[in-house]
Image (cartoon, rainbow, N blue to C red):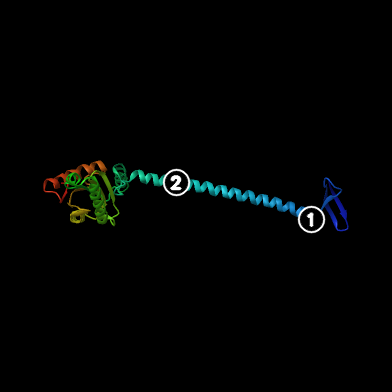
Amino acid sequence: YNFTYQDSSGTGNASIAVISDNDWMLLHVFPSSLTKTMEREANRSGTTLTFMISVAFAAYIAFLLLSNQKWRHIMMRHAQTDHMTGFLNQTAVRSAVNDLLRKNPGKLYAFYVFDIDNFKQANDKFGHAFGDTVIRRFSELIRSCVHEDNGLLGRIGGDEFVALLPVPDHEWAKKKASLMNETLDCDCISGDASWHMSASIGFCFAPQDGASFHELYKKADSALYTSKRKGKGIHSMFR
């Protein structure tokens, strides 16, 4: 039973509950001020709880979105990367070169094509595992030559690589090619297998020799075969 009472101290709410199986009754008496305070606190707590749940839900949604973006970025990089070298793969480097040239139409770039000399012989003699060692060693050395030049590195396939570097002038690009030839002229050792590595290089310039990957690759590749014909382990500029 619930009822409201009034006495000298004011009004209040009371409830009486019969305790079964005996003659006792349980009586609860609360002053009106207390019940009103409890009601306000309940309303306030409900509002606070609703707010906290909303914030938590929003944070969870934001976490899911950020996680999804991060995962998508990781997957995209995975799809664009040659996993043995860490360079851009053929599709990705084509797109990256075209994008860079389109955004900087008047800027001077040198486009290099590399081919590891006699790589098939190393594979045939020592096996594909050793060939992979040569590829990784080659990529480490090329990266060490250009890591401060803010350029692009890509693996076209097999033992063929490309690089696009911003250059101040043609003479600088020639010196860079000489440095790369010198750096790549070294021994590759893995266990009991030892093989002397060198690379032929062909290069050309954007925008004078082309404004797309296709145009630059065609001309740098022509210069590369000039290096091959001249004895390998050297560089040639497209003319």
Q: How many marks?
A: 2
Separation of disc 2 and disc 1 at Cα?
A: 53 Å
Q: Residue at x 43, y 48 (%)?
A: 70
**Left of 66 or right of it: where is 122?**
left
Q: Residue at x 46, y 45 (%)?
A: 68
Q: Nearer the viewer, residue 176 or 211?
A: 176
Kind of residue at disc 2: Gln
Kind of residue at disc 1: Ser
Is there CB contact under 8 Å for labels 2 and 1?
A: no
Can see residue 207?
Answer: no
**Left of 200 or right of it: where is 6?**
right
Task: Return the x and y of residue 206 as percentages of the image width and height.
Answer: 24, 47
Neighbor class of circle 1 (other Cα within 10 Å; few <14, some 14-19, many 20+) is few
Task: Return the x and y of residue 229 as percentages of the image width and height.
Answer: 12, 45
Task: Return the x and y of residue 39 as percentages of the image width and height.
Answer: 74, 51
The residue identified by callout 2 is 69
Earlier residue among tags 2 and 1: 1
Q: Is residue 148 above or below residue 204?
A: below
Task: Return the x and y of residue 151 as percentages of the image width and height.
Answer: 29, 52
User: Which residue sits furthest right?
Assistant: 8
Neighbor class of circle 2 (other Cα within 10 Å; few <14, some 14-19, many 20+) is few
The image's mark for residue 33 is 1
